[in-house]
Amino acid sequence: MIETLTKPATKSAAFEMKDLNLWYGTNHALKNISFSIYRNEITAIIGPSGCGKSTFIKTLNLMINTNPSVKMSGEINYDGMNILDSKVDLVDLRKNVGMVFQKGNPFPQSIYNNVAYGPRIHGIKKKKELDELVEKSLKDVALWDEVKDRLDAPALGLSGGQQQRLCIARALATKPDVLLMDEPTSALDPISTIKIEELVLELKKKYTIVMVTHNMQQAARVSDKTAFFLMGELIEIDATDKIFSNPEKKQTEDYITGRFG
């Protein structure tokens, strides 16, 4: 009897970068970046300040385009389409590729209206549908039980950790495919940081997550893959365990062991 071998399932790529270059005016900030980000994985982007981490993550939903001095070349393929093509619908892209920033930045409105904001923009008006979306999004970030009795209270009255979870709920309410997180715990205390990390690991079941972090222990704890950037270049990307235990490149090893950065 011939034994048939089943091939391991290959993950599909959410993003594929090919020779991505970015300039701020004459400053060449990203240089020939080529790698893939896979679905339902957490990809951590690490590197010293000024290495291009935040610039890179903002290319994935073209938030970087708000800077008029930016020029880009190469490809960022999302679902098989190069988003640098002028025909791309930015509203649709940003609905599918949500973003959470360094510091929780709730709107000066109620908790409910913060979460309902995105769905309303995208045409959802029925109160029942909005109520369900708000509840689901807040449950997804483990905030529902803490705020369900004060949804009309100002979001700015929440603690820092709650505000950051609210902002993640706000991003989830538009039912994105990918979640970008630019140092989401850098302004938080250790207990809130642990809650966000636990949440991120849970969200990976439903979303593709790209996280910029200065905290290498955080990258080691939560990510599947880690990409090390230096001076606008991608030095190395690999499975997180390998990056932290046996990196290929000396610059990666020097950064991880604290010789610079």
Image (cartoon, rainbow, N blue to C red):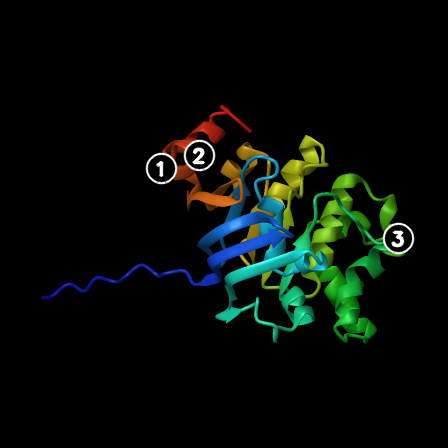
Disc 1 secondary structure class? loop
Q: Nearer the viewer, mark 3 or mark 2?
A: 2
- In the rendered image, the residue lying farthest to the front is 26
Label 3 CA crowd tier, 10 Å (few <14, some 14–19, many 20+): few
Decide if residue 154 is on the left or right side of residue 169: right
Tell me if residue 94 comes above or below residue 199 in the rendering.
below
CA gap between label 3 and label 1 equals 47 Å
Are the residues tagged 2 and 1 within 8 Å (C-beta)? Answer: yes
**Residue shown at 54% from the left, 34% from the top:** 216
Pointer 3 or 1: first along the chain: 3
Residue 218 image point, x, y percent? 56, 36
Q: Nearer the viewer, mark 3 or mark 1?
A: 1
Give 236 or 137, whichever is nearer the viewer. Answer: 236
CA gap between label 2 and label 1 equals 8 Å
Residue carrying label 2: 252
Decide if residue 97 is on the left or right side of residue 127: left
- In the rendered image, the residue lying farthest to the left is 1
Amino acid on which the number 2 mark rests in the picture: Thr
Amino acid on which the number 1 mark rests in the picture: Glu
**Residue shown at 77% from the left, 76% from the top:** 123
Residue carrying label 1: 248
